[in-house]
Amino acid sequence: MTSSDYLNDIKEIKDLMNKSSRFISLSGLSGIMAGVYALIGAWFARQELLKVYETKTRLYESGQYTGSNDITFKLLAIAAIVLVLAIVTGIILTQRKARKNDEQLFDKTALKLLINFLIPLATGGIFALIILQKGFVGLVAPITLIFYGLACVNASKFTFGHVKYLGLANIILGLIATQYIGYGLYFWALGFGVFHIIYGGLMYIFIERTAK
């Protein structure tokens, strides 16, 4: 047996170990689509905010403003639609990739990945709703970015390790966003939109295409 045979055997053993301990069927395309959905959602949210600003300005000028305009429900609805679309697309594309990799979509490793991702994410979501209830609207975007970043870092132990860099980027962006209250929508679009598209694109080009 030559040295190249030994190297091939070691590579196969390493691949089997990674496959058993890490969920490697995450789709780069799903990351790209999630980013696109986030940017579209941010655009619709901005349009709603502009409508409120124009309405308030008009009512102020006429002396009829009562402070009753509240678009929180609309913004939450937009965020929910973006989330649902991203989840459904992610499941479909990841399932397709799992079949190609001869993996089960919901095995023990995938379950560990899901649990470790959802604990920080759900905590951040509940905390953001509490903050929103208390009237601190400007902190919602930073909080969601930070906790989403923590979720990515936590889940990276059970999938591609470089997912943690996406998480760290969102954590840093969320911390910066706390210093620029009022620009949360732009930070939200950058973190959930642009960062996802860049990461998903790099993942698709350098991992998925080279594996074909």
Image (cartoon, rainbow, N blue to C red):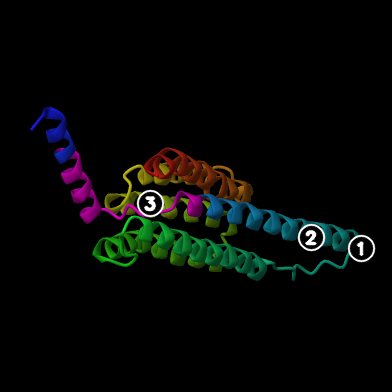
Q: Secondary structure at mark 2?
A: helix
Residue type highlighted by circle 3: Cys
What's the distance in space between the residues labelled 2 and 1, CA to CA?
Answer: 17 Å
Q: Which region is colored magenta?
A: 10-31
Percent position (x, y) of residue 72?
A: 64, 67
What's the distance in space between the residues labelled 3 and 1, CA to CA?
Answer: 49 Å
What's the distance in space between the residues labelled 3 and 2, CA to CA?
Answer: 34 Å
Residue occupied by mark 2? 51
On whether residue 24 falls in the magenta region, the answer is yes
* Residue at the (85%, 60%) spot, across then down: 60
Is residue 190 visible in this depiction of the protein? yes
Marks 3, 2: nearer the viewer: 3
Q: Earlier in the sequence, mark 3 or mark 2?
A: 2
Can you say whether 132 is above or below 189 in the image?
A: below
On whether residue 152 falls in the magenta region, the answer is no
Any mark on residue 62, and which? 1
Q: Is residue 199 left or right of residue 189?
A: left
Q: Earlier in the sequence, mark 2 or mark 1?
A: 2
Q: Earlier in the sequence, mark 3 or mark 1?
A: 1
